[in-house]
Amino acid sequence: MVDIDGEPDRPTPRKRADARRNEATLLAAAASAFVTSGVDVPVRDIATRAGVGVGTIYRHFPTRADLIVAVYRHQVEACAEAGPTLLAESDTPHAALARWINLFVDFLVTKHGLAEALQSDNAAFEALHAYFLDRLLPVCAHLLDAAAAAGEIRPGVTAFELLRGVGNLCIGAGEPRYDARRMVELLVAGLRQHQVTEPR
Amino acid sequence: MVDIDGEPDRPTPRKRADARRNEATLLAAAASAFVTSGVDVPVRDIATRAGVGVGTIYRHFPTRADLIVAVYRHQVEACAEAGPTLLAESDTPHAALARWINLFVDFLVTKHGLAEALQSDNAAFEALHAYFLDRLLPVCAHLLDAAAAAGEIRPGVTAFELLRGVGNLCIGAGEPRYDARRMVELLVAGLRQHQVTEPR
DNA sequence: TAGGCAAGTGGAACCAGGTTCCGCTAACCA
DNA sequence: TGGTTAGCGGAACCTGGTTCCACTTGCCTA
């Protein structure tokens, strides 16, 4: 494996001090802007909040997706890491899957506009989509495989499909008449094999 | 019931001939543009196709939603009218509901970008959302009530929620790895009561 | 400690798409 | 046939994303 950026090592720590400071400021500004105005908040607003020019944002985060990923990386990682843990702790793989999906849903519904952005076909969000898939797809696939192996779920549903479906259902959470969690619950229930055909 | 626009009656047919012609041209141009470029196609493109100025579009269809509604009105009406028919023809209310939802899904997945527009929180699509709800919510509610009365589905799911959930799941149909129909199937399956608690 | 220089910055300028506005055109009526 | 005015076209404006480059400043070396 090749290191991407050189670790905190001898040969010059790379970025200038002010640049590092700005990056941190920007992350904080973006995070707070996302909370109040959603992930679609205009770039200029974030720049203003951070007290920098728009050029500075683009230098650090060439696309909006990069900024979103940077802001939410920790939480995505935590979700990814929870997968194996849940599988070990839960009574059945299907239960683990259901609990894991709950984590995912919690994450999405609390980030105003994130679910929308994730499914948007806008090219600006390409990298966001890719990152989520990269990180969460294997986890989801693992849980799904385990449940399938246990004969608990109907076959033929892919991890991609499930993630995407769940993501889709989270769009519009916030609307009072729409309970995204309940819809996801229905989806996960539908995933379950109705009658066990052959315990073998 | 009050007529919306005055039928083809005596007292002045209202609009000028060229205006009526333009409206028809615009509808045709928009329909074809929607097919090739999705419902998000730039207003200017539609105007060019129709050979009119953008002002003319706004005169006839003040918001994009008005245009979309006008283009798809027939199909939405057909879907709405199919509800009662299906209920009468199907073996069980749940079967009718499933078939009706299939119609709805067929409609959405064949209209590139429509599902996205429907769920968008963009104010421009307010009227679109409202129209769909207006027309389809009562139909869905009727089917849902019938299924609930037959004890076939789990209680507590509202028609609004179901419509919205199904609409959401249709976002991104077109993506080869995502089968919206299958996801909706799962959702509808999850809606089904697993074991009938009390036949009563 | 000063000087040089490239990394980094700010924000004006540009682009795209939606929306408004108004002078002109041409249907329709008397 | 001429007057009135609905309706038209499209330039202009607005918002928000993106690029670019002259200027600033941190850092390194002499």
Image (cartoon, coloured by chain):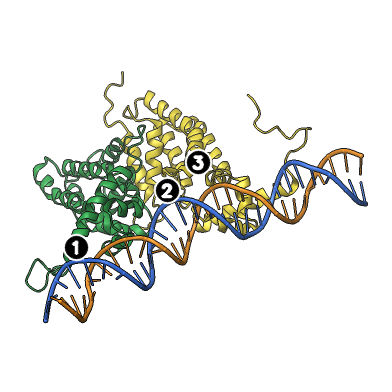
Chain colours: A yellow, B green, C blue, D orange
From this view, report whether residue A131 is shown above or below residue C30: above
* Chain letter, disc 2 residue: A
Rendering quarter of residue A153: top left
Are there few (<14), some (14-19), or many (20+) residues within 10 Å of tag 1?
few
Are there few (<14), some (14-19), or many (20+) residues within 10 Å of tag 2?
many
Are there few (<14), some (14-19), or many (20+) residues within 10 Å of tag 3?
many
Which label number is shown at residue B18? 1
Which amino acid, mark 2? Answer: Glu
Q: CA distance from mark 3 to mark 2?
A: 11 Å
Q: CA distance from mark 3 to mark 1?
A: 48 Å
Residue B170: x %, y % from top left: 31, 43
Q: Residue at x 31, y 18 (%)?
A: A200
Label 1: element kind: helix
Label 3: element kind: helix
* Residue under label 3: A128
Which amino acid, mark 3? Answer: Leu
Which label number is shown at residue A116? 2
Whether labels 3 and 1 belong to a single chain: the reply is: no
